[in-house]
Image (tube, rainbow, N blue to C red):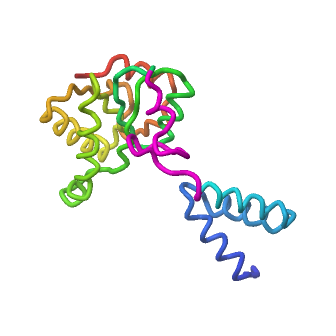
């Protein structure tokens, strides 16, 4: 018979809701919290709260920042190409690999039906308004079924507004997530993108 403690079970349940954490991982975190010095746990907790208070999203691209605009959008030396990605992890990966020197736009919606398309209309309008200032827009959304549908909608919307648009080349496996692709494959996909 296993002994259940309500506070422990509630903590595990809440921590499990963090993206991709298993029950075992949540249990390890909860056990660490229980077994660690209270002062240090409080410091970690305060660091989390500080993140929530200080980190905002860039008004132009949606990347994390402490200012209104992120350091990437403020960098006038970057090339005049806009790369549409689905999350900040892709930006982090591209910046770390140093394979792209333009700017980004985070499109964090997956358009799979009319309702989601309607809900995404404001974000699409923001993208089109921002994209008009760039020589080219590259769509770099993961080639999952939802990602492909989203890419096609964005490509049409951008072309309808006379914006030069290209898409990452084939080479990314269908159903894959861009943030898990190795940097060599990602770099080749950028170089061989389709227009």
Q: Please tell me which residue is depicted at 52% across the width and 28% down the height of the picture.
A: 95
Task: Identify the image quadrant of residue 168.
Answer: top left
* Image vertical order of residue 163 relative to residue 109, above or below: above
Q: Please tell me which residue is depicted at 36% across the width and 31% down the height of the picture.
A: 83
Q: Which span of residues is magenta-colored?
A: 52-76
Residue 111 position in % (x across, y down): 26, 51
* Image vertical order of residue 92 relative to residue 56, above or below: above
- Quarter of the figure that contains the C terminus: top left
Q: Toward the viewer: 127 or 75? A: 75
Decide if residue 128 is on the left or right side of residue 57.
left
**Numbered marks: total:** 0
Residue 144 position in % (x across, y down): 34, 42
Decide if residue 114 is on the left or right side of residue 45.
left
Q: Toward the viewer: 65 or 41? A: 65
Decide if residue 37 is on the left or right side of residue 151.
right
Q: Please tell me which residue is depicted at 26% across the width and 26% down the height of the picture.
A: 166
Q: Toward the viewer: 124 or 54? A: 54
Residue 12 position in % (x across, y down): 65, 69
Q: Is 129 part of what is drawn in magenta?
A: no
Q: Is 70 part of what is drawn in magenta?
A: yes
Decide if residue 184 is on the left or right side of residue 12.
left
């Amino acid at each position: 018979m296993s002994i259940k403690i309500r506070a422990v079970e509630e903590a595990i349940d809440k921590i499990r809701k963090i993206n991709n954490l298993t029950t075992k991982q949540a249990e390890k975190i909860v056990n660490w919290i229980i077994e660690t010095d209270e002062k240090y746990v409080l410091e970690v907790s305060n660091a989390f709260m500080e993140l929530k208070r200080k980190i905002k999203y860039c008004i132009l691209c949606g990347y994390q920042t402490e200012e209104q605009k992120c350091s990437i959008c403020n960098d006038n030396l970057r090339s005049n190409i806009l790369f549409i990605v689905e999350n900040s992890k892709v930006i982090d990966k591209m910046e770390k690999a140093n394979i792209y020197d333009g700017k980004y736009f985070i499109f964090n919606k997956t358009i799979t039906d009319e309702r989601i398309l309607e809900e995404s209309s404001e974000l699409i309008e923001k993208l089109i308004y921002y994209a008009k200032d760039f020589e080219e827009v590259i769509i770099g959304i993961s080639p999952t079924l939802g990602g492909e549908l989203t890419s096609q909608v964005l490509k049409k919307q951008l072309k309808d507004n006379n914006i030069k648009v290209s898409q990452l080349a084939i080479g990314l496996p269908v159903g894959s997530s861009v943030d898990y692709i190795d940097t060599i494959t990602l770099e080749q996909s950028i170089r061989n993108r389709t227009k």
